[in-house]
Amino acid sequence: MSNKSKPVTSCDKCGACCTHMATPPMFAAFFPPRGKKMPKFMFGTEDHDIVKTFSRALWAETRALFDEAWKTNRSAKDVPCFWFDEATRRCRHWEFRPTICREFEVGGEDCKDHRERVGITVNGRVVA
Ligand code: SF4
Ligand code: SF4
């Protein structure tokens, strides 16, 4: 390992920010516990527009995952987002990821914090 380092510019082989989200951020609103309704303030949001483009299969998969998440209180645990693929370290449904995931700055302070938390960087920089 050299002392040289470079700025974080890519999510390749990382996924650090997904490793403790438990569920896709904000999407729980669209898959509330059975018998409950989606909160009114989520109507017409960008996330609502994204969820409306889900295929039937993606809807069913996500509904089932949220059913399990509500049952096990998953959001209270420090576990990976259920859309995160541990093998590839990528989001399995990247094109449908929530707004907050789209806006998360690669190489920003929060990104570096997440990478350091899981040991991917040293001092906020990738070890070359
Ligand atoms: S922590 Fe940063 S580099 Fe890693 S996946 Fe998230 S945004 Fe990408
Ligand atoms: S990018 Fe995908 S896997 Fe990562 S937190 Fe967002 S929805 Fe979950």
Image (cartoon, rainbow, N blue to C red):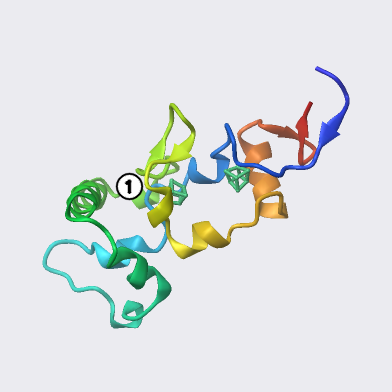
Q: Give the amino acid type for the residue marked by disc 1 in the picture.
A: Arg
Does the beta carbon at disc 1 come under 8 Å from ligand 2? no
Q: Quick one: quadrant of the C terminus?
A: top right
| Element assignment for label 1 | helix
From the image, tell me which residue sits under label 1: 74
Q: Residue at x 43, y 60 (%)?
A: 98
* Picture quadrant of residue 124: top right
Q: Quick one: quadrant of the N terminus?
A: top right
Badge 1 local density, few (<14 within 10 Å), some, or many (20+)?
Answer: some
Side (left or right) of 81 relative to 57 = right
Residue 60, above or below 121: below
Side (left or right) of 70 relative to 15 = left
* Picture quadrant of residue 39: bottom left
* Picture quadrant of residue 91: top left
Q: Residue at x 88, y 24 (%)?
A: 3
Report the residue that reaches farthest toward the left: 35
**Residue 44 placement (x, y as % from top left):** 34, 81
Instruction: Give the mark count.
Output: 1
Report the residue that reaches farthest toward the right: 3
**Residue 32 placement (x, y as % from top left):** 23, 64
**Residue 63 placement (x, y as % from top left):** 20, 54
**Residue 88 placement (x, y as % from top left):** 46, 30
Q: Residue at x 68, y 38 (%)?
A: 116
